[in-house]
Amino acid sequence: MLKYLIRRLLYAIPILIGVNLITFALFFMVNTPDDMARIHLGAKQTTPEMIAAWKQAHGYDKPLFFNGNAEGLDTLTDTLFFQQSVRLFTFDFGLSDSGRDIGADIQQRMWPSLALALPTFLLGLWVNITLALVAVLFRYSRVDKTALVAAVLLMSISGLFYIIGGQVLFSKVLHWVPISGYQPGADAWRFLILPVLIGVFAGLGAGLRWYRTLFLEEVNKDYVRTARAKGLSEWRTLSRHVLRNGLLPILTGVVVVIPTLFMGSLVMESFFGIPGLGSYTIEAIQGQDFAIVKAMVFLGAVLYIAGLILTDIAYAWADPRVRFK
Amino acid sequence: MIALLWTDVLVWLLVIMLALWGRLAMRDALVRARWQQVFASPLATISAIILITYLKLALLDSIHLRMDDGQLRSLLDLIFYHLLDASERTYSAPFATHEFVKSVVQQDGQVLQVHLPLRHVQPGMVWWDLLLAAALASLVVWLTRRGVPDFFKNGIFARSPRGVFWGTAWGVWFVLIALWLLSHHYHVFGTDKVGNDVLYQAIKSIRTGVLIGTLTTLLMLPLAIGLGVAAGYFKGWVDDIIQYLYTTLNSIPGVLLIAAAVLVMQGMLETHPDWFGSVAERADLRLLFLTLILGLTSWTGLCRLLRAETLKLSAVEYVTAARALGAGHGRILLRHIVPNLMHLVLISIVLDFSGLVLAEAVLTYVGVGVDPTMNSWGNMINAARLEMAREPMVWWTLAAAFVFMSLVVLAANLLSDRIQQVFNPRNA
């Protein structure tokens, strides 16, 4: 188990290097350090000396991938790519283009993101699974068919409509909750309840269908027939046997998402003015702040890979038949 | 003068390819039976007709002419030409005869606040328009039925319920003709802040949505098929490299990768103003790049699917037999493997469509979608956000985007459900 874990962790390294290579190529091949310097110094009156000075001050004066002037290993390490990558690998995100410490920003904004994403995730999971079980309980009947039609309808409506509609109905017309904003601490729930509920509702269609298919595959297996044969009620069969065995495929889909909850939701957070990582990213994209976008890409990749590894562990823990080789 | 934009060329290319491939595939009686089974369902028939209507409108909007004044106009623009110069001064509600907000006017020395009448509205024609539309729709459907008497004989709609088919066809024609007639006398979906007709925007947005939904898949197909088949067929180190490639791409959060690529693309467009002549061409180029970027970031799913299928296929007897007979890699791949993957490719085109249409709205909202000057549902929703905050609310832009967008996504979802059900018996 430990050996397997270490190998998985080692396997993550080339992927992260690949991720870095992609972002690096995207940003630097087209947007050269010279361009960046010009943007930062302002379009007017930039002399070559000023650009050179800016590049030196920000560490952009090194060659991209290969340093012909250096010797030995330094030909590879004394380059922009290596220097920048090593800094990312130690989670040192440096300063944003506007001069703020990205690492500190992320640490601070992580919590509102989590406060929104975690309840949405848990509540969504519970609602989806419960409704799917009910649909399976009444499978192929009118209840089930109505649920399926409703699910397709819900899926076909863009999430943006749910958000705007929810805001208008509950904030503007009914005045139940503030339309947007955030306040840390105990009062946060007033700002979070609407986005959480909308998030759950928006995911309902896809979730219901997904879990229904999962449970339907279990429902015709032999052990379920046995459970029924020994006289268990249908609901008890479903909740005690089918749900438990269905948990395994649920795990694979769910665990991989958990780490990425930290990243927050781009659209939700910016619509509701929640100062999390999602709105942070959107602001960076709209302000063309490459340093922040790069940091978030790296962070996202790390969290996703962490999710994959966690999935494997959860799998082994839940199903003793799984053995690692 | 016909002036084709880049995306025009591509979308027509896509349609021609699909038509050719459809012809080839339909020769196979088994494949034809499958598709006929798909459309035996009334819902699938209705969905398909709606999707085809959207596609046709998008195609009409994809033949551009250069007018005398140098403007680019599509055939669809010419059909709705009356709406182009039917601009009002500001907001007006659907079917309204007066402006939505009061203006200050001086009358007989008095200063009054009144709702000014709209300039391009002729009230009182609704019932006549609807009646005429119903008659015309009936005429069109009757002529089509007369024109192609053996329409149902062998085509994919052979088993679809006749009543449903012709009913839907009539409904679609009725709605289109009625909208066109009504748009001469009213602003059916009102006007926006600067007085432009919202119906026109919603109709023009069809092209953007359909193009993003289809071109993206077209552009990613070479990558997905090439790499997926190579990985599954050659195995070994080729497989390792390709798997590494898509694991890496997959681990980057989708929106961020797209956002990063779009930012780069914007920078490129800014530094190369010589690539395009006008604002419209610039917007078109941006749309093209957006589909390219979406394609580059979304090939991994299909690639994985094709890899698995190729792995299975390359162990099948007839492939082994072909190899024993001395067929080369190229021949085996082209004759025996790729043709047997095509149904997966087609299913993925339909499956991805609705997701991509929805993605356009979100990406445009984030600021990395289509050009702000381009008509798109995303841009309409974006504008509506501020309008909803007004007092009283301006709701019709959002309503128009909602109706036009949800209809096509719903149709695509229903159709892809049915296709999956037929082609993948495990889901039944």
Image (cartoon, coloured by chain):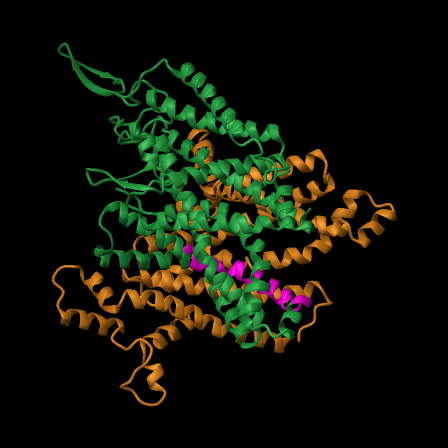
Chain colours: A orange, B green
Query: How far from the left and from the top, in percent, is residue B196?
Result: 29, 31
From the viewer's perspective, is residue A285 above or below residue B372? below
From the viewer's perspective, is residue A317 above or below residue B346? below
| Overall secondary structure of the magenta section | helix
Query: How far from the left and from the top, in percent, is residue B418?
Result: 61, 43
Residue appearing at x 34%, y 52% in the figure = A283
Quadrant where the image shows the N terminus of chain B: top left
**Residue A232 is at least partly visible in this image:** yes
From the viewer's perspective, is residue A158 above or below residue B247? above
- Foreground: A179 or A233? A233
Residue appearing at x 69%, y 44% in the figure = A133
- Foreground: A296 or A23? A23
Left or right: residue A284 compared with residue A253: left
**Residue A182 is at least partly visible in this image:** no
The image quarter containing residue B78 is: top left
The image quarter containing residue B96 is: top left
Residue appearing at x 38%, y 73% in the figure = A85
Residue segment shown in magenta: B294-318
- Foreground: B353 or A266? B353
Left or right: residue B82 compared with residue B407: left
Query: How far from the left and from the top, in percent, is residue A72?
Result: 35, 90
